[in-house]
Image: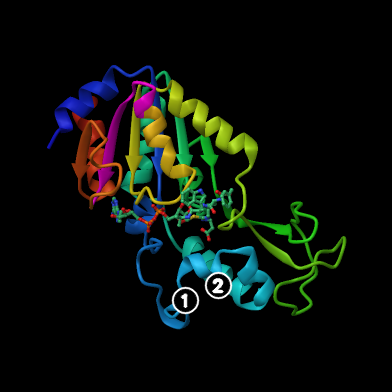
Amino acid sequence: MHTTEVAAALKGAKHVAILTGSGISAESGVPTFRDAQTGLWSKFKPEDLATPEAFRRNPKLVWEWYAWRRELVTGAQPNAGHLALVELEQRVPEFTLITQNVDGLHQRAGSHNVIELHGNINRTKCFEEDIAVTEWKETGDSPPRCPRCGGRLRPDVVWFGESLRPEAIEGALMASRRCDVFLSVGTSTLVHPAASLPFEAAEGGAIVIEINTDTTPLTARAAFQLRGPAARVLPELLRAAWPE
Ligand code: BV8
């Protein structure tokens, strides 16, 4: 294991950028995209439900899938992996946390400089007008209706085939190209454009470290791989870099 070399790199870093995927929330009980769905959702593949086409075809089904996931997320707690990143943010001169997760667990753990690439499941917007909606009348409609235009409401997440918010992807690309240490944590590195960020960082000369329980398309390109669960590996790394 390269914990000592990685700890030394972190200790000397000026700007650390992190990309996280659903693997960092796995130990909080939030299933990853790869994990088979359970219960009445077991017959659906996430990428079949997380599209505007699926919502047009069956808005009630998609809305209730997100309601189920929202309950899971609300019942979950940030784990030692999330908390280690909060500590890392306080220990390095510049820090950018780029997440693909829509669960909001980084912010609940106490992380500040967070870029939510794919939105947040606890926010809602109007499907027709594409603007945020915070209050609506519960009329029993599923999905509920927009108080302004009567259109259907949808979760404020980025669906497959939809573009990311320009400021989010531009901020993530800038941090990836400018950082000197890049950690890719708990992501299968398959969904674009997020999956290109660790490679942008490597192109930019950063030391790229992968923390994952498995190999991914990034493994061969990373300078170091720390194989293991994020909630164990990240605190170990912080202790190796800052023993006090
Ligand atoms: C777009 C929000 C413009 C919704 C999500 C280039 C090449 C190929 C395809 C494309 C391309 N460019 C665009 C595409 C199409 C598509 C795409 O990438 N498709 C993939 C499937 C090939 N991208 C898009 O559609 C994007 N939009 O590009 O718009 C455009 C449009 C059309 C055509 C061209 C351009 C929008 C993508 C965003 C979609 N929304 N989420 C919701 O959550 O419901 S993506 C969603 O899936 C997540 O946010 C995340 O990004 C992804 C899942 O990946 P991971 O988080 O990594 O999770 P996964 O389960 O896969 O893996 C878990 C990993 O953790 C594993 O490696 C496992 O080993 C590890 N692990 C498990 N436990 C632990 C652990 N590691 C450590 N510790 C543990 N305990």
Q: Is residue 113 visible?
A: no
Q: Nearer the viewer, residue 158 or 91?
A: 158
Task: Specify start and end residues of the magenta stretch as a single range.
Answer: 202-213
Q: Earlier in the sequence, mark 2 or mark 1?
A: 1
Q: CA distance from mark 2 to mark 1?
A: 10 Å
Q: Nearer the viewer, residue 219 or 4?
A: 219
Where residue 204 sits, quadrant-wise, is: top left
Residue at numbered disc 1: 44
Q: In the picture provided, is 62 more to the left or to the right than 15? A: right
Q: Nearer the viewer, residue 82 or 205?
A: 205
Report whether the residue tagged 2 is closer than 8 Å to ligand 1.
Answer: no
Q: Is residue 212 magenta?
A: yes
Q: Position of residue 143 (x, y in %)?
A: 70, 73
The tag on residue 83 is none
Q: Callout 2: few (<14), some (14-19), or many (20+) C-alpha neighbours within 10 Å?
A: some
Residue drawn at x 25%, y 22% is: 9
Q: Amino acid at mark 1?
A: Phe
The reply to whether discs 2 and 1 touch (Cβ–Cβ < 8 Å) is yes
207 w.r.t. 219: above or below: above
Residue drawn at x 74%, y 61% is: 127
Q: Position of residue 22 (x, y in %)?
A: 40, 54
124 w.r.t. 184: above or below: below
Residue drawn at x 79%, y 77% is: 139
Q: Secondary structure at mark 1?
A: loop
Residue at numbered disc 2: 65
